[in-house]
Amino acid sequence: MALSAEAARAHLEAGKPGPLSVDGRLDLTNTRLKSLPQGIACYELDASSSALESLPSDLQVESRLILDNCQHLRSLPAGLEAGAISLRNCNSLHALPEGLETWFLDLSESKRFTQWPRQANVHSGRVRLRNCIDLQSLPSWFGTLATLDLAGCVGLTSVPDGIRVTGWIDIGGTNITSLPPSLGDAQLHWRSVPITHRIAFEPQSITAKEAISEQNAEIRRVMIERMGYLRFAQEAGAKVLDADTDPGGERRLLHIELEQDEPLVGLACACPSTGHRYFLRVPPSTKSCHQAAAWLAGFDDPALYHPVIET
């Protein structure tokens, strides 16, 4: 049964069975439907922010399947195929199905995703996994991709050899310390900023003088991040704006001027349990250690911040 997009939505929300066909875009955004009937075929399906928990096994989507912000989505059918599949911020989704076929795959912000199928295919397209913080590995079946965005995937430590990227790979915020030979020609990005191999994998060789002299503000920020804010502050001769003590010992509010960028201001402090020292960035307008600690604790008004003990 061929229906208009509006009629198809009304049909499904009324709980009527399939099959049904929609020539254009089937809009099921924000619907309270937990499941769909068998026999749905459409050019594009957008069920963003819906209550869907699963999809029918015979679903046919020719172009884009958009399931962003589906917080109850737990599973997808085997053999799922669409031109582009977007699963952004689906935090109940742990695994992708066997036999998945697509050209563009986006799992960004799906923080609980961990499990790849044994076999699937992304046809030389783009894969975005930004901030999939539980992800521990990548599948070798990726083959050749146009781009691979791994920014914020803190659990990743390596990329399998055999994966090729014709464009760029973003490793910002990951724990990847090297790339395999198959990625030797890939352009490197750090949270969308193009960087060199040295900045990515030899941060110990970067000096504060070199970072300060970098004219590109975005690259400078990455260089400072890769150095580590505390080492950068020490090498750069940071100005002490304020000092006091907390259970970890002395803490200092440090300030560093940067050309063509806002000043770098941070609270240098130590963990009272481990003694490990940290540099915690705060707004450039911060004037005192107490104000910095209050802001880090989520208080806009430092006068309201009176902890019994700071940890």
Image: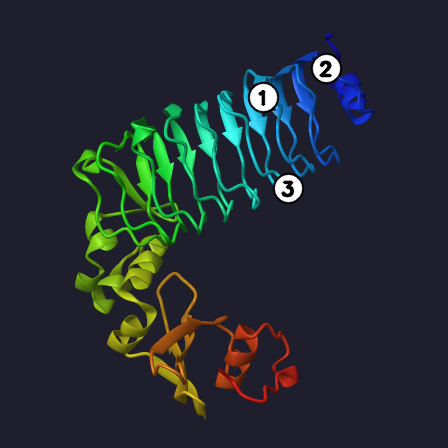
Residue 178 image point, x, y percent? 21, 48
Between marks 2 and 3, how big is the CA–CA gap? 23 Å
Q: Residues within 10 Å of mark 2 (few under 14, many from 20)?
A: some
Q: Is mark 1 on a helix, strand or loop?
A: loop
Amino acid type of the residue that numbered disc 3 sits on in the rendered structure: His
Between marks 3 and 1, how big is the CA–CA gap? 18 Å
Q: Is mark 2 on a helix, strand or loop?
A: loop
Q: Which mark is residue 239?
A: none
Q: Is residue 244 visible?
A: yes
Q: Which of marks 3 and 1 is in front?
A: 1
Indicate which disc, 2 or 1, sits on the residue closer to the N terminus: 2
Q: What element carries label 3?
A: loop
Q: Do the residues labelled 2 and 3 touch (CB within 8 Å)?
A: no
**What's the residue at 61%, 41% (across, down)?**
69
Residue bearing mark 1: 57
Q: Is residue 288 visible?
A: no
Amino acid type of the residue that numbered disc 1 sits on in the rendered structure: Ser
Indicate which disc, 2 or 3, sits on the residue closer to the N terminus: 2
Amino acid type of the residue that numbered disc 2 sits on in the rendered structure: Gly
Seen in the image, is 159 located left or right of residue 255?
left
**What's the residue at 32%, 40% (across, down)?**
169
Residue 50 image point, x, y percent? 69, 36
Q: How crowded is mark 3: few (under 14 residues within 10 Å), some or many (20 or more)?
A: some
Residue bearing mark 2: 18
Between marks 2 and 1, how big is the CA–CA gap? 13 Å
Q: Are marks 3 and 1 in contact (CB under 8 Å)?
A: no
Up the image or down, 133 lies above or below 300; here it is above
